[in-house]
Amino acid sequence: MRGMPGEPRRVVVALSGGVDSSVAAALLLRQGLDVIAVTLQLRPCGEGVEAGSCCGSRAIETARAVADRLGIAHEVLPVGTEFRDRVLRPAWDLYRQGRTPNPCLACNREIKFGVLWQYAAMLGASQVATGHYAVLEPAEDGDFALFRGRDRSKDQSYFLYDLPREVRGRMRFPLGSMTKAEVRALARDLGLASADRPESQDACLVAEGSFAEALRRAVDGEARPGILVDREGREIGRHQGLHRFTVGQRQGIGVVLGRRAFVRFLDPETATVEVTTEEGDLLAGGAEVEAVRWWGPVPAGDLRCQVQVRYRSREVPALVTPLGADRIVLRFDVPVRAVAPGQAAVIYDGVRVVAGGLIVAAMPVA
């Protein structure tokens, strides 16, 4: 993001111990800023926590080594209680309702751009920086505009759509104009301990096995068992918990039908899971989206954009119909597979983020 005239010079960088946040800190130093590194400890560093996670002792040691190499202050901020109450518990509530949440969205909003910002203010910092691959620029209307990162294979604008307007001017994403290869090369040139550290696999959320099941255990959640039915509604089996399923799932369904089977629909009222052997049953012609966050004025009418319904899904052209300030209906130009309630739908105009929200229902193909 471009610097603003007269801005204070102290910035807190969320230093996980990974190569991205390490290089972000180095780039901020090059800009002559007063950089303080803070490592968020999301869970206790102890037995059962992956060494490569953002809460593992090895990650904290790597972050400290990077800070020492750069000559900046380093602090560890325990946020386990906030992480459990603001990220894990709400995610479990959605799983139990038959939705498929993306906890990274809540973690960004509540922890990195919430708790961390409050802590940064206590340290006298005016801004918080992260290693996200995205670009944030001042907009003509006094707000800010969010763009995809230059490295499309690493672009993380999808996870940032929910940034509230009041914090946008306080954020920095130094890696937005870089590729991952360039980031690693710079880390090696600088002799940073994180230069060749493997990619994070969201181990801060789950150490092993199924995320949904590990989440249930972490919050002592109660599973909702129910029945499996075919597309005609006939019972074909039973399951041990609605949270174990998501739309489009093929593995671990628990029935043998002689053909590949997929999860088509989850009924949150009865905890029933509908299974189909026809992949065409997974196609959606659109989606209803709520809790929409706009980057700019709410359009007065329909607009044509591109939409991405999962982080790794391909964007598709769509017609967007606003229904007030915080709800939209999407109508895809081509059917989209496995549109899952609980996931985010992010709307783009080229590389610029227009809006984003949470999918509440898939619409049938017309």
Image (cartoon, grey):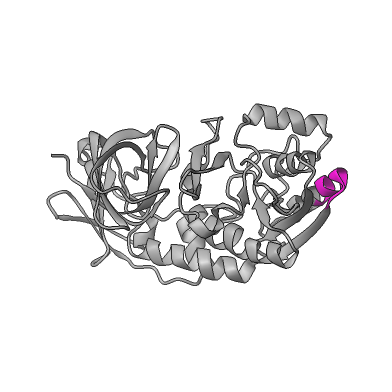
Quadrant containing the C terminus in the rendered view: top left
Given residues 221 and 234, the one toward you in this image is 221
Magenta stretch, residue numbers: 64-72
The residue positioned 40% from the left and 67% from the top of the image is 93
The residue positioned 34% from the left and 42% from the top of the image is 250
Given residues 313 and 229, the one toward you in this image is 313
The residue positioned 60% from the left and 57% from the top of the image is 112
- When asked about the image quadrant of residue 117, the answer is bottom right
Q: Is residue 319 visible?
A: yes
Is 57 on the left or on the right of 346, as rendered?
A: right
Q: Position of residue 233 (x, y in %)?
A: 14, 55
Quadrant containing the N terminus in the rendered view: top right
Is 343 on the left or on the right of 287, as rendered?
A: right
Is 175 on the left or on the right of 309, as rendered?
A: right
Figure check: 140 above or below 328: above
The residue positioned 69% from the left and 32% from the top of the image is 183
- When asked about the image quadrant of residue 352, the answer is top left
Query: How many discs appear?
Result: 0
- When asked about the image quadrant of residue 125, the answer is bottom right
Figure check: 90 above or below 322: below
Q: Position of residue 350 (x, y in %)?
A: 40, 32
Determine if the magenta segment contains residue 15: no
Figure check: 139 above or below 125: above
Q: Is residue 106 visible?
A: no
Given residues 35 and 5, the one toward you in this image is 5
Q: Position of residue 37 (x, y in %)?
A: 76, 53
| Secondary structure, magenta segment, majority class | helix
